[in-house]
């Protein structure tokens, strides 16, 4: 799940970024409205977190253009403003939820997951394909009764493929979903990542396999007999 974080407070952004990564999110951070619009136009985000107090523009005026770029992307507002009128304006402009500063990080993550579940079916709480069960809210996956021990990026890759089973994903699509703007990416990073994920699925006895469609991309499907 790739999230755009629009927050000009560097310390708060860093803490939020680290906490969300620990819960399986890939986070791109920008500190102003201009960069937020450019990022939203470039990447298909699973959700956006928007602070209203931005240095180059009132965050309220950014909601409408973000809605034009990404009309169905869940949008959570962060605000230090006490006035209920600002919150009402944000919700009326297209935001899905809000959180007042200061806030508890666990509440932010829970609120974010909640608005994502309200959206497209791909954000449902439990995903299941064949013998694999995946619960993004609990950060857990299993093959039958056997739990899978996955790294953050392996978890993100499995989530991506389970949301689009029997569908070919290009290498660029996998990279975009799993790696943020600031992540260093070697030329064979995706191949290595998917090789590790295949081995873990195989070791757990899963009938699912990530097939390499040479020159096209990758597909998650059941192994052929």
Image (cartoon, rainbow, N blue to C red):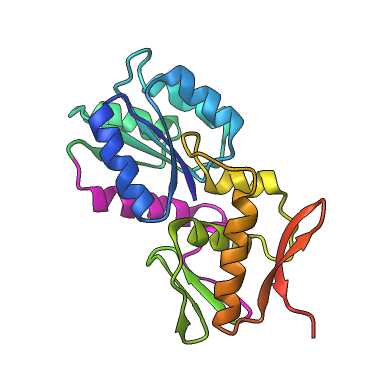
Q: Residue at x 44, y 57 (%)?
A: 152
Q: How many marks?
A: 0
Which region shows up in magenta? 103-130
Q: Nearer the viewer, residue 69 or 185?
A: 185
Indicate the position of residue 182 as horizontal and vertical percent values.
Answer: 46, 34
Indicate the position of residue 68 as horizontal and vertical percent values.
Answer: 58, 28
Residue 121 can be seen in this image: no
Q: Residue furthest top?
A: 56
- Classify 144 as above or below 26: below
Q: Nearer the viewer, residue 213 or 51?
A: 213
Apparent side of residue 221 relative to residue 185 in the rendered image (left or right): right
Instruction: Specify the quadrant that holds the C terminus.
Output: bottom right
Q: Nearer the viewer, residue 98 or 55?
A: 55
Q: Residue at x 40, y 65 (%)?
A: 139
Residue 16 shown in magenta: no
The overriding secondary structure of the stretch rendered in magenta is: helix
Q: Nearer the viewer, residue 52 or 160?
A: 160
Q: Residue at x 62, y 64 (%)?
A: 195
Q: Residue at x 46, y 67 (%)?
A: 150
Q: Residue furthest right?
A: 215
């Amino acid at each position: 799940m790739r999230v755009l974080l629009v927050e000009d407070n560097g310390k708060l952004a860093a803490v939020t970024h680290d906490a969300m990564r620990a819960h399986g999110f890939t986070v791109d951070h920008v500190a102003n409205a201009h960069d937020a619009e450019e990022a939203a136009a470039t990447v298909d985000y699973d959700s956006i977190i928007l602070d209203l107090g931005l240095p180059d523009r009132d965050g309220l005026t950014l909601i409408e253009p973000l809605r034009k770029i990404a009309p169905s992307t869940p949008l959570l507002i962060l605000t230090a403003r006490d006035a209920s009128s600002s919150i009402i304006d944000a919700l009326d402009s297209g935001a899905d939820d809000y959180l007042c500063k200061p806030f508890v990080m666990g509440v932010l993550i829970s609120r974010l997951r909640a608005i994502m579940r309200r959206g497209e079916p791909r954000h449902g709480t439990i995903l299941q394909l064949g013998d694999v069960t995946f619960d993004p809210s609990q950060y857990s996956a299993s093959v039958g009764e056997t739990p899978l021990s996955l790294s953050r990026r392996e978890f993100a890759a499995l989530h991506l493929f389970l949301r689009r089973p029997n569908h070919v994903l290009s290498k660029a699509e996998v990279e975009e979903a799993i790696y943020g703007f600031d992540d260093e990416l070697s030329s064979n990073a995706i191949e290595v990542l998917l090789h590790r994920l295949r081995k873990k699925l195989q070791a757990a006895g899963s009938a699912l396999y990530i097939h390499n469609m040479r020159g096209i991309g990758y597909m998650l499907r059941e192994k052929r007999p």
